Image (cartoon, grey):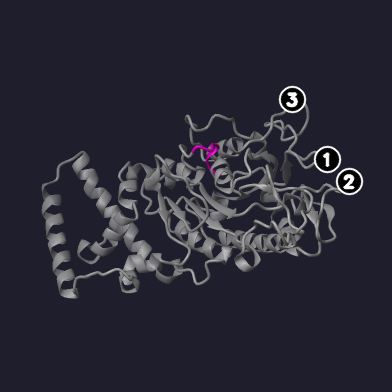
Amino acid sequence: MGRFDPRTSRRQVLALAGLGGLAAMLPGPLRAQARRAGGGRHRFLFVFCPGGWDQVQVFAPIFDNDAIDREFPATAANVGGIDFVDGDSRPAVRSFFEDWADRTCIVNGIQIQSVAHEICRKLVMTGGSRGDRDDWASRLAAADSAGLAMPFAHLGGPAFPVAHGDAIVRVGEAGQLPGLLDGGALAESDLPHDAPTDAVQALEESFHAARVAELQARAGRGRERALFDAEALAVERAARLAALGDRLALDDASDTAAAARVVAELFEQDLARCGMVTCMGRGGGGWDTHSGNEFQDRHFDLLFSSLGDIMVDLAERPGSGGGSLLDETTVVVMSEMGRVPAHNASAGKEHWTWTSAMLVGAGIAGGRTVGGWSYDVEGLPTDLRSGETGDGGVTLQPGHLGATLLALADVDPDEGSDLPPIEAVLA
């Protein structure tokens, strides 16, 4: 990629600065380029299922307890080392494991110490409930943000940036990014605005180019030179963002696979490290099934169908380390809570403080299920090293999962990570 002329790139530079990308590029972009030359950047795609999924539909194959309600006939199954609940009503689940079990690890029996949605989301995404910790994705993005226009591309779902707010770029679920980059968003705004004419814009860009050239000619070494290098890199990243154009648009915000393709475009162009999308389930109603729990089966079928599409897309795209994007991307699939085993009076299920998570792709010890369930669908103590349940193990917490993600990215834990990683998950 060659050097871009500032006279034709000022709009992109301003757009990028508005996205927080320029600040993210200041710390050592040349060091990041040198590091990537020897291997790909480890990336993370979070797929969040808002509302609380029902773990007994897929992740808890318990069939000797009559108090557990499932809406459709189901059986215990194992494909490629993955234990799960199989059923004809959700064929995409089995299909996914048949194709990707060797890259998949399920973590069962994670205790969420709340039944309130917002608190649970803070717990699963930060390891705490007070809101004073950055979420995992923001921390992962901030730890390797050099040279990235959009370190954490957020298309939906929970995010709680605190110290690393400059890492997150909230793209939105309606495909707003192309309009922000080319200026088209102004035409759709209800707010009064006075955009410059083309002639005024050309005059501004000419002045900007002349001023940059003058300052660059007088620039010395050290931080002053680094700032000009950062601007040149910002121009390049912004132009690459703008060149993606409609490939960053979302025609259907509820299409999880389509949203993930936007993130994959950013990954492929080395413009982002983390991304988050949501799966709202069939009909877009979410997973909070206090009535009509039969929607859980339909939601899981859509989720796993979308995950299959995501895996194929990542596998077909080139990564920055010589392999595919799948070789350097970990897909993290989670919800903020589970649901109680038995139906309520409305054929729905209430909130439950135990849940599961699923990790797929780079760095994962695939073909295995870590942790487990008691007869009453509560998490069993788990040995962090072996993943087996039994005496001497610990109750899995969201902090264990977060520490595992940080370990995958070789990020040193800080005061926000007070639990060790689940070593059994790591390849």
In terms of depth relative to the viewer, which is nearer, 142 or 216? Answer: 142
Q: What amino acid does circle 2 point to?
A: Asp
The N terminus lies in which quarter of the figure? bottom left
**Residues at badges 2 and 3 in contact (C-beta under 8 Å)?**
no
Do the residues under discs 2 and 1 have CB atoms within 8 angstroms?
Answer: yes
Task: Measuring from the top left, give residue 171's x and y in whole percent.
Answer: 43, 59
Range shown magenta: 125-130
Which element type, helix, strand or loop, lies under badge 2? loop
Q: Is residue 194 visible?
A: yes
Q: Which residue does the numbered mark 3 point to in the structure image?
A: 392
From the viewer's side, name the closer residue of 351 and 384: 351
The disc labelled 3 sits on which kind of residue? Gly
Question: In the rendered view, does 202 fall on the left or right side of 255?
Answer: left
Pointer 2: what residue?
64
Asked whether 204 falls inside the magenta stretch, the response is no
Q: CA separation, marks 2 and 3? A: 25 Å
What amino acid does circle 1 point to?
Answer: Tyr
Of label 2 and label 3, which has the lower sequence position? 2
Along the viewing direction, whichever of 358 and 185 lies nearer the viewer: 185
Q: Residue at x 61, y 35 (%)?
A: 400
Does label 1 or label 3 sit earlier along the sequence?
1
C-alpha distance separating marks 2 and 1: 8 Å
Image x and y of residue 193, in percent? 24, 69
Residue 324 appears anywhere in the view: no
State the image coordinates of residue 167 (x, y, percent, origin top left). Answer: 40, 47
Label 3 packing within 10 angstroms: few (<14), some (14-19), many (20+): few
